[in-house]
Amino acid sequence: MDGSDLAAQIIGHRIAVRLVLRVNFIPEGGAFGVKHTSHVVGGILLAQGLHHVDHDAYRTSLLHCAVGQRDAHVAAPGEKGAVQVAGTVHQQKGFFGILHGNHFACAPSTLRHPGRGPATLQSSHAKRLTTNDRPHPPSSSYKPKHFPPTYPGARHAPLCCAGGLKMAVYTEVSLAQASDFLKSLQLGTLKTMEGCSGGIENTNYFVTTDQAAYVLTLFERLTAEQLPFYLRLMKHLAFQGIPAPDPAANADGDVLHTLNGKPAAVVNRLRGRSELAPTAVHCALVGEMLARMHLAARDFSMQQPNLRGLAWWNETMPVVLPFLTPEQTSLLQSELAYQNHVATLPAYGALPRGPIHADLFRDNVLFDTSADAARQPELTGFFDFYFAGVDAWIFDIAVCLNDWCINLATGEKDTERTDAFLAAYANVRPLTSQERDLLPAMARAGALRFWISRLWDLHLPREAAMLQAHDPSHFERVLRQRVRQPLTLNSTNA
């Protein structure tokens, strides 16, 4: 089968993609969203349009290629150029990810620092691409109908590299550039550098120096005006003993830097893994730490509103309405009207406020679980603070409850986990009467926020998004459940 025949099949049958051993090229195909593609290495089609394909249709064929190889790294022998990652499968989730860059491979390879010997490449089919082979935005006319094979209701399907972090690589950073950058921050001599593919927001590299392990991030979407709030908040929380990433400062005390023309930051690499099937124990640990985080941030001096709050919902609803059924339109309009009404209530104005995470889902928390089953897991990290803002603390709680403490298949409340979370939170910071009264409304607000954002991501995808949109129907189900069965407190967790 040549490249043209394969492209015709892909364009005509999006879910017909199966294992392909080697394809030298694919011509432009607008219906598939493919502009410039490359090559197949070890059985994986490397194409910008891949995120349009039904993952269930080809997942089985892909898994054998890289299962267990958490980070596949490639560099040309003797080259001091960009470190690239081709594909990784996370054993727990079973996700495959692709980096569009200069080098691709499926088999694991070893990257060595310049001066420590050439990099080895264990695939004979790796190919060097030109600048014209860089990914292009997917066609906005195509509306994906299939979603990644993640756990039911999962918010996205990122690759999780060591430590469970979601990562992506869009902007190339050479070893020499990274080495000089880290030395300028007095973080030591670069030993290893690994890119991870899978997120859709930023470029990320795991770097290890002779001092410690770090995460180097180049911000692709957030602006230099927005970033100081997030970075300074993380540093403030880390100083207060919250296990948040601690951005490295330069000699002038700045935590926001510039690398390759992009805003950049370096944070310490947190240990642990995300727990995607949490128990009541995990939920209690998150509840307790969230309360500690809220209190620790009370004296944080910088101000920035929750940029995905009520104002954004009002602005975004008209944009997504044309894609909804009449029943969905009715639910969305009525719920938004209700939330606007709630925002006018005196009790809402009296809610305790401060910096909130606003996106503390299961995959944004890390745990270190000992091999000793009798020991309680240790919560080792809150991360991904790039939706944080000043808002009501009870909204932050509600967002957590809507992910950590529900039946993912139905959206129904899990009473044991809900009670554990709220009791642990209240043990550190008891809820006010206004918070207790408005928890049902805030649980609905949290579901509405993520339903709208998922609809927006699905129907109006951003440029350079490498992964499929999250399934918005999950939070539609959660919202319907919260309307039918309001989330209320009992006497033990009030």
Image: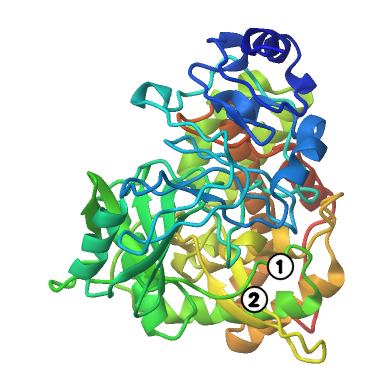
Q: Position of residue 355 (x, y in %)?
A: 43, 67
Quadrant hosting residue 145: top right
Q: Is residue 113 visible?
A: yes
**Of the residues shown, which amino acid type is indicated by label 2?**
Phe
Considering depth in this image, is 323 or 461 the residue closer to the camera? Answer: 461
Up the image or down, 255 lies above or below 316; here it is below
Q: In the visual, does 473 lie left or right of 431?
A: right
Which residue is tagged 2?
Answer: 367
- Residue at screen point 42% across, 56% down: 205
Q: Position of residue 284 (x, y in %)?
A: 71, 80
Alpha-carbon distance for marks 2 and 1?
7 Å
Asked if disc 2 and disc 1 are in contact, CB closer than 8 Å, the reply is yes
Which residue is tagged 1?
Answer: 275
Quadrant hosting residue 70: bottom right
Q: Position of residue 488 (x, y in %)?
A: 77, 67
**Of the residues shown, which amino acid type is indicated by label 1?**
Glu
